[in-house]
Image (cartoon, rainbow, N blue to C red):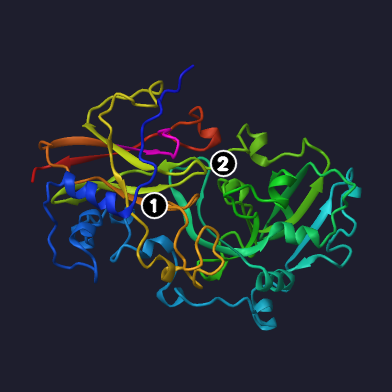
Amino acid sequence: MSSPHPKREIPPTISRRNVLGAALAAGAGTMLPLAGLPAGASAAEVALRPPAALLDPEVAKYLAGPGGTRDYFQNCSPDQRGKTGSWERTPKELAAAGLDAWTLDVTTDARSQNLLKEPRTKATHNAITYVDLLRMANQHPVRILKSLVCLGMPSMAAYGLFEGVALRDVLWLAKPNPKGVIRRIAMHAFDPKDPAKQQWCSTLPPARVFEDPIGMAPVMLCLKFNGDWLAHGGPVRVIVHEHYGFMNVKDVRRIMLTNDNTETDNYAKSGRDVNSPMKSFAEKPAVVSKQPLMFGGRAWAGMSGLKLVQYAVAPADTKTTDDDVYLQWLPWKDGVILPAPANFASLIPGGPKNVFGLSEDGAPLQWPIPSFLAYWVSPPVRDLKPGKYRLFCRAVNNYGDAQPMPRPYGPHEGVSDLQSTDFEFTGS
C-alpha cells in the first residue's frame, strides 16, 4: 500500500541564504518597516523575524522574543547565559535541599541476581548518592539540547539545556557481570512526598543505555536544566534524547537490571507504544504579522529531522472528518524555517562546551537540532481576500514525509494530528 504522502522533492539543505531569499522573492521585494530593528539585523532578516511590535500579543509566544533568541532557552535568566556552570554544592546547600538524603539503588530483580557483581542499594549502605553524581558530572558531564514533549500533547512542556551524567557510567559502578544476560533496564520513579511509594516505571534495552546509536546522545541522569539545578522532575531525572516525556522518568530512585524481557512500562500496560521515538511536529500555527500578512509558529525536530514546515489557508467553515487525517486536498505551501541565531553559542547557559550536536565553537552541526525546537514563518501573503479563515500547518521530515506520517496515525505513539487555528483577515 502506498503512503498517504508520496515522497516530495526537497532541497538537501536549507541555508541562511536561500531561506532569506525565498521570503524576499515571495514578498516581491517589499520590506517591513526598519524602525526598531535589532542591532546588526538586515531588512531581509526582519522579513522573516518580524519585530515584536508587529506581533499579535496573543500569539507572540510562538516566536522568539526581541532579538529572536531568548525563547530558545526557556526559564534561563540573562545572568545565566554564557557562564561556566559549577557542579559544586556545599554540605549546607545539600542539606537545605534534602539532597544529603537522596540515594539511587542500582540493583536487579529477584530472578536476575547474577547481573551485577556489586549492587548498590540503600539497604546495603552503598547506594549511589547525589554527591557521587556531582563528582561524576564534574569529570564527565553530558549536555543535551532537547525539547520535552508528552506522548499525547501537541506542544512542548519544556525545552533547553539538560546537564548531568551518562546513565551507563552510573551502572558501571555496580560492576555488571559479563556472564549475565541483561534484557531490560527499568527506571523507577517515586513519589517525592512518599519516597517509599513507587509511581512510575519505564524501561530501555541495554544496548541503548550502554552504547549510543549514531546521532543520539547518551541516556543521562539529569541534574541541571538551563543552567540551574533541576526543579521539575528533580532532583535527578532520566533524559533520553530521542524519546517522549514518559521515558524521561522524574525523581528516579531505583535502576533495576533484569533478565525478564516481559518487564514493561506503565504506558505499555495502558496500550501505548513505548518504543516510539519523537516524530517531527509543527505546533498550532499563528498569524505573526498583519502588515504584511505572515504566518508562523514553532515546531520540533524528531529523529527523522525537520526539513520544512508547510501551511495551508482554507475557509473557516472547512469541514474535516476523523477519517481524513492527512488533508492532502488542502492548498499546501512551503514556509521557511528560521536559521539558528547568529549568537546561538553565547546564549547557552554555561557556554557551548561539550554540548552534544554542537561544534567546538558552539555552532549547530545540524539545524534544526534533532529533538530540539525551531521557528518557522511563511513568506508575506499578498493574495488573500478579507474574510474568516482556518490556518493549518504540518512538518515535513528529512525523508519527505509530511505530518502525521511516516507512521500510522495514532496518539498512542505520539500525537501527530495536523494543527490549525482560526483567524479573520480584514485586508491590507
Q: Is residue 96 magenta?
A: no
Q: Residue at point 12% right, 50% down? A: 29
Q: Where residue 18 sits in the image (x, y, percent)?
A: 28, 49
Look at the numbered discs 2 and 1 and tell me whether their residues touch, using CB distance below 8 Å. Answer: no
Q: Where residue 40 sits in the image (x, y, percent)?
A: 24, 70
Is residue 29 visible in the rendered structure shown here? Answer: yes
Q: Which residues are magenta?
A: 392-403
Badge 1, how many Cα within 10 Å: few under 14, some, many 20+? many
Residue at numbered disc 1: 374
Badge 2, how many Cα within 10 Å: few under 14, some, many 20+? many
427 relative to 20 in the view: left or right: left
83 is higher (above) or lower (below) than 362? below
Label 2 SS: loop
Residue at the far left in the pictured view: 428
Q: Is residue 398 magenta?
A: yes
Q: Where residue 11 sits in the image (x, y, percent)?
A: 35, 40
Is residue 199 visible in the rendered structure shown here? Answer: no
Q: Residue at point 14% right, 57% down? A: 32
Q: Earlier in the sequence, mark 2 or mark 1?
A: 2
140 is higher (above) or lower (below) than 340? below
- Nearest to the observer: residue 190 or residue 115: 115
Q: CA distance from mark 2 to mark 1?
A: 18 Å
- Residue 192 sits in which quadrant? bottom right
Label 1 SS: strand
What numbered label is drawn on residue 109? none
Q: Residue at point 73% right, 57% down? A: 168
> What residue type is disc 1 on?
Ala
27 relative to 9 in the view: left or right: left
> What residue type is disc 2 on?
Pro
Residue at the far top in the pictured view: 1
Residue at numbered disc 2: 277
- Residue 386 sits in which quadrant? top left
